[in-house]
């Protein structure tokens, strides 16, 4: 029996065997498996990345591997604002030129980066590490809200800018924080929304986001709508 007379059995078997043992190298297979664990990376993309690394000189692979290991073991959260930092206090919190009396509250570091990218903000940040989401089981105690309240209690904060996504979860979180802070003194503002409902900050273009920070409004005004 050959591949032309077996009625397709042979080719089916061939496909099956390929699926079981497709890699000629266990080392390559392991690397592909590790890459494909990353979000958005399928097996095909993982293989493409692995083959790319193999084509490059060894130092390229070493630099990649070492940067991941070093980053994972040494990076920490800023003691004040909870952003990722190389030291106890991040470069923004320790920058003497930043206005420490204004805090911008963001969901995560990506939103902070988006705002930094606009070049329109010179205050400091507070990274919540998420937003309140009963659906996902995330409550206020899972987020860096207590430390925000402590910062506001310190007395030197004049304004807290809420820059959370315009989703139900974002609104819930805004309102929760507003209730916690409103008796403590600082003005509570929210970034102006030229941004469509449901938009994530990090996907908003720089100009729009920059403008929405400059045109921020008192949070209470948004409640009476
Ligand atoms: Zn910081």
Image (cartoon, grey):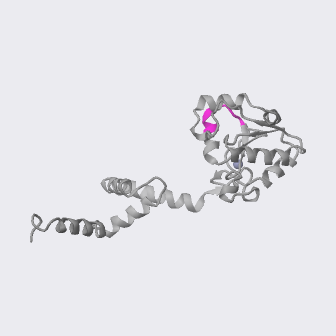
User: Along the line of sight, which residue is nearer the eye, 132 or 143?
Assistant: 132
Query: Was residue 207 drawn as part of the magenta stretch in this picture?
Result: no
Q: Residue 16 occupies which quadrant of the picture?
A: bottom left
Which residue sits at x=67%, y=53%?
Answer: 129
Considering every residue shown, the one lying at the far bottom of the view is: 1
Residue 7 percent location from the top left of the image = 15, 66
Q: Nearer the viewer, residue 158 or 191?
A: 191
Classify 170 as above or below 211: below
Q: Position of residue 136 (x, y in %)?
A: 65, 57
Residue 119 visible in the snapshot? no
Instruction: Classify 80 as above or below 188.
Output: below
> Would you say residue 107 is visible in this rendering?
yes
Q: Residue furthest front?
A: 7
The vertical placement of 55 against 6, above or below, is above
- Position of 194 with respect to 27 (left or right) is right
Q: Where is the C terminus found, in terms of image quarters?
A: top right
Residue 3: image x %, image y %?
Answer: 12, 65
Count of numbered badges drawn on the protein: 0
Classify 129 as above or below 31. Answer: above
Range shown magenta = 114-122
Residue 78: percent from left, percent from top: 69, 53
Residue beneath the point at 77% across and 53% down: 145
Q: Is residue 70 left or right of residue 61?
A: right
Q: Quadrant of the N terminus?
A: bottom left
The foreground one among 85 and 82 is 82
Quadrant housing residue 215? top right
Q: Is residue 117 magenta?
A: yes
In the rendered structure, the answer to whether residue 135 lies left or right of residue 5 reads right
């Amino acid at each position: 029996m050959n591949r032309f007379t077996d009625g397709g059995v042979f080719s089916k078997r061939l496909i099956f065997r390929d699926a079981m043992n497709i890699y000629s190298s266990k080392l390559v297979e392991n690397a592909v498996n590790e890459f494909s664990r990353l979000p958005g990376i399928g097996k095909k993309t993982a293989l493409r990345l692995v083959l790319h690394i193999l084509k490059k000189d060894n130092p390229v692979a070493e630099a990649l591997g070492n940067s991941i290991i070093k980053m994972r073991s040494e990076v920490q959260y800023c003691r004040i604002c909870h952003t990722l930092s190389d030291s106890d206090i991040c470069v923004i919190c320790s920058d003497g030129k930043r206005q420490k009396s204004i805090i911008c509250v963001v969901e995560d570091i990506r939103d902070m980066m988006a705002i930094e990218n606009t070049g329109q903000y010179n205050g400091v940040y507070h990274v919540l590490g998420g937003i309140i989401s009963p659906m996902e089981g995330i409550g206020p105690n899972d987020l860096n809200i207590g430390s925000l309240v402590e910062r506001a209690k310190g007395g030197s904060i004049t304004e807290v800018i809420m820059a959370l996504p315009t989703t139900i979860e974002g609104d819930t979180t805004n309102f929760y924080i507003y209730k916690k802070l409103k008796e403590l003194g600082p003005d509570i503002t929210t970034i102006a929304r030229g941004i469509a409902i449901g938009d994530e900050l990090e996907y908003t273009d720089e100009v729009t986001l920059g403008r929405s920070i400059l045109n921020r409004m008192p949070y209470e005004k948004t409640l009476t709508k």
